[in-house]
Amino acid sequence: MFHPKLPLIASASEDGTVRLWQSSTYRAETTLNYGMESAWSLAATKETNMLAIGFDEGCVCIELGSDDPVASMDTTGKVVWASNNDIQTATVRGLASGSGNDDDALPDGERLPIIPRDLGSCELYPQMLKHNCNGRFVAVCGDGEFIIYTAQALRNKAFGQALDFVWSGSGTGDYAIRESTSTIKVFKNFKEAQAIRPATSSAEGLFGGQMVGVKGGDSAVLFYDWESGDFVRKIDVCPKEVYWSDAGNMVLLACEDTAYVLSHNAQVTASAIAMGQISPEDGVDGSFDLLYEISDTVTTGKWVGDCFIYINKTGRLNYSVGGNIQNLVHLDTSAAGTTKHRILGYLAKEDRVYLVDKSLNISSHKVMLAVLQYQTAVMRGDFDAANELLPSIPESEYTTVARFLESQGFKEEAMAVTTDSDHKFDLALELGHIDVAHNLLDEIPEEERDSTDTLAKWKKLSDLALKDTNLALCESASKSSNDFSGLLLLYSATGNAAGMEELAKAAEEGGKTNVAFVAYMLTGNVEACADLLIATKRLPEAAFFARTYLPGRVDEIVQLWKEDLSKVSESAANSLAMPSQNPDLFPDQAFAVQVEQMFMAQRDAVKASGVPASDYPTAKDDLDLNLIELIKARGGGGAPPPAPPAPSAAPEPMAAVEEAPAVEAPAPAPSPPEPAAPAPASPAVEESMGDDDAMYEDASAFVDSVADEPPSPAAPVESPAPAPAAAEEPKADEDDFGGDFGEEDW
């Protein structure tokens, strides 16, 4: 079978062997035997180098050689590539940028519409193709041979036997070959100049560039001078490839999982060679210094000034400036997740880097040279040069420059450069520029103000304003972000009663019932708290809340609870008790209602002016008052005893208490005492309520005024005996829910 992509002929035999021959020379290449009995079938595809073999006992799929593209591009944009033995060329200059207008430019990553031109056929199968430093010649290597052609007409310039071939980084006709594992030959202007015997056990590879690099068998790379062949330095790493910068001052050693960037001091090297100060073991001290390390796998790369552009094994096109890695684009990968592209070169006039994939499709990506130069100047600390380069950078790239400055710690400069409002807002927050961040949020269009992103920004601004004790801005930002919990914290800490009332309404409308409940509770609006619990169907909680804070609404809320519970269990609903139906289960209910009325009146009186915080030292003791017991004691030492049976109809004592909150017990009939003149209740109450400083001090007076009021004429109360003179005040019941509330709330 003729392979559809490779110049190979494959045959399968009943003896279990598979043989491969060159399709042009019919030379036997190799014989394969997998020990799986007879081989019966072969299959191959045009897209890959894969070959499938069918045996009696299974199938084997192998890859023949490498499917990496064999192509090279010179500094002018001319590309030469090999398709089997055929050599073709094309130019990519101007294809990506179009007429120079951005609207006509091809999108990044788009396949370029190249027009190939055949240069001819090569005598050997190309496995490597490389231009020299100025692009005039191209070398083709394969099958242990090399041929040097002219790049324009593919005329033969030189040829020979070699395991490896590399060009010099400066000389037009200078190159080196690895003749064997122990001999390296250097050619000057296509003529052999000298032979180098590396100081290593075995020369396993060869690297070109500004120096001759020899990959040693002891996991090291040795550098030699092109002119003299002198040993310069040994680096104890095992690189797969060596990349030199155009200036020759930097070199990258790409190893298996990492890469090392070294600086090369050409003056020190030249001086040591001229003076003969070279150590046979260490070479030239100070010739190389480690700059930084790239923790990534470099598959192919290209230096652009002091910036290194590369593709890693996962298909990411990155560039490194001073060790800082920036991602440009994620490229397409193979089914195994590995990259399919290689870097051809970079054209500075078009600000584009050109790539080729395994199918020989050429694409490009825009990389601004001015941006790379600016970043390089920043990394060197040359800010004067960086400022001079900034005007030459298009505004569309300012955000990229700003993010680079931020990564280097220059956040003030980054905020001044960036044109991205989101990036500028984040930098303003990090730098503490509250006014700048506030202005950016005010400039947001009206249709975007309710977006999640905008609300999150307002929340960040409110947190920063609170940290900076800018309470006015904190309040404004919290309102704009609907941060009800933050407003609750702010208003409660600053004692803003009006703001707390607005917050309660806004939180209720916004569905934040927890915040609304707490806000209503802090402002004393217990009626709204109960209504909120009812509206949210929290009827059990509403009933217990009313038992403590709104005794007058217990019947109403328990009735709602019963109606709701009856839908689930009628017996459970009937087991609920109500003050109107079960008065014996609600002791002191009438007094609790009276305390509720007192609380409401006092709350309404101080609502306008509030209670000053300076009153706390004197008012805190009033929190221990048991108002129910106080009312009962001032009203006659406790609840009136039940009246004896009499022919005339008389109201029950509890009813009398309900009609008159506190009643003075009458004296015995034989000698009734003259009742004391009742204190004017309303003026006393008004006076105590109006005076904020005396609010808590007048609690007893308020209770006295209510307790001293005479009973209503329509509801006389008779008592067979006076109350004992030395009767002790009844103790407050610890389990009395309403009594406890009245005392604490007052």
Image (cartoon, rainbow, N blue to C red):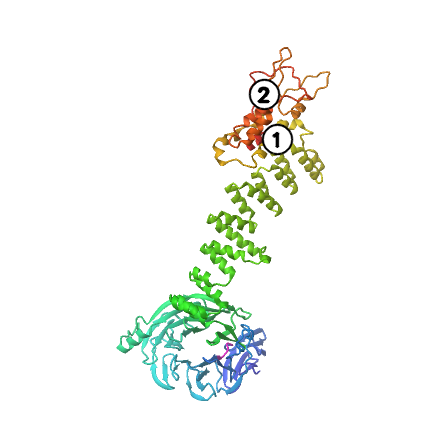
Residue 259 in view (yes/no): no
Up/down of 717 relative to 739, above or below? above
Horizontal placement of 554 versus 259: left or right?
A: right
Q: What is the tally of numbered marks visible in this picture?
A: 2
Q: Position of residue 141 (x, y in %)?
A: 45, 82
Residue 30, above or below 318: below
Q: Quadrant of residue 223?
A: bottom left
In the rendering, at what x and y percent does residue 562 appear?
A: 69, 36
x, y percentage for residue 321?
42, 68
The residue positioned farthest toward the top in the image shown:
670
At label 1, counting other C-alpha atoms closer than 10 Å, the crowd grade (few under 14, some 14-19, many 20 or more) is: some
The x and y percentages for residue 174 are 38, 83
Q: Is residue 68 rendered magenta in the image?
A: yes
> Which is more toward the observer, 391 or 406?
391
Q: Main secondary structure of the magenta part?
A: loop
Q: Residue at x 68, y 29 (%)?
A: 580
**Region of the chain picked out in magenta, as a range:** 67-71
- Image point (59%, 34%), residue name: 604
Q: Which mark is residue 254?
A: none
Q: Secondary structure at mark 2?
A: loop
Q: Which residue in the structure is indicated by mark 2?
A: 637
In the picture shown, does residue 121 fall above or below 565? Answer: below
Disc 1 marks which residue? Answer: 597
Kind of residue indicated by mark 2 = Gly
Quadrant assignment, res 587: top right
Residue at the (55%, 25%) spot, across then down: 701
Residue at mark 2 to residue at mark 1: CA–CA distance: 21 Å
Q: Residues within 10 Å of mark 2 (few under 14, many from 20)?
A: many
**In this rendering, would 408 be left or right of 720?**
left
